[in-house]
Amino acid sequence: MAFSFNNFLVIALLLIISSSFTIVKADLVSDVCSKVTSPTICEQALRSDPRTKTAANLEALGFIAIDLAQSTTKSTINLIDSLLKGATDPTLKSRYSSCKENYADASDNLAECPGFLKAKDYGSLNARASAALDDPDSCDDNFSQAPAEPAGLKQASLKLQSLCAAIDVISNNLNGL
């Protein structure tokens, strides 16, 4: 009887420990995203990638966030190209061209991020992610007056800003800030 009770205790303890590790992993995304301006958008963007379910630490989550930010930048440039082709209004053409430059700059900044994360150069990672965060915001500023920014472009901007902010949070946490 004592033997089976001891086995029960060991199994129960192992279940509690293993479930707490799962909870910690699941909270990694929430912890990071809770520190950005748009936590819901951040969580949706990060959780859209199945790799976040197995991200064991901030570094792993950082690589995922960088990948997603780069992908978002590329898809947004494609969206802007499409908007440019369909635009007849010279004001919109000018704004879209400016936005394309902004997103190209974001792409350049994000391209350097994986190397900085791998090298544990968190200060440079933060600087590049912050610069990339400013680029979609600059695009948004082009639409402060009518005509309004297309909804798809605004959504892409918010997503990229949230991902870049998440990279900033991750770099700060890894840097002990």
Image (tube, rainbow, N blue to C red):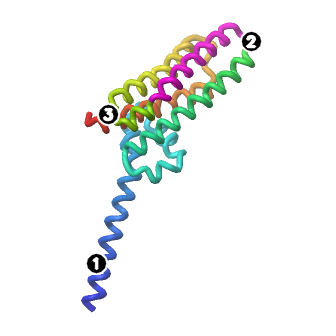
Can you tell which of label 3 and label 2 is closer to the viewer? 3
State the separation of the CA atoms marked 3 and 2.
44 Å
**Along the line of sight, the residue nearer the viewer: 29 or 56:** 56
- Residue reaching furthest top? 90
Q: Name which residue lies at 68% across and 22% down.
A: 81
Q: Are marks 3 and 2 in contact (CB under 8 Å)?
A: no
The secondary structure that most of the magenta stretch takes on is helix
The numbered mark, 2 or 1, whose residue comes first in the sequence reads 1
SS label for mark 1: helix
Q: Residues within 10 Å of mark 2 (few under 14, many from 20)?
A: few
Q: Which mark is residue 172?
A: 3
Task: Give the magenta part as a residue range.
Answer: 88-112
Report x, y in % for residue 6.
26, 83
Q: Quadrant of the C terminus?
A: top left
Query: Where does label 1 land, which residue?
Result: 9
Q: Which mark is residue 133?
A: none
Determine whether, in the image, residue 74 is placed left or right of residue 115.
Answer: right
Amino acid of disc 1: Leu
Query: Where does label 2 land, which residue?
Result: 88
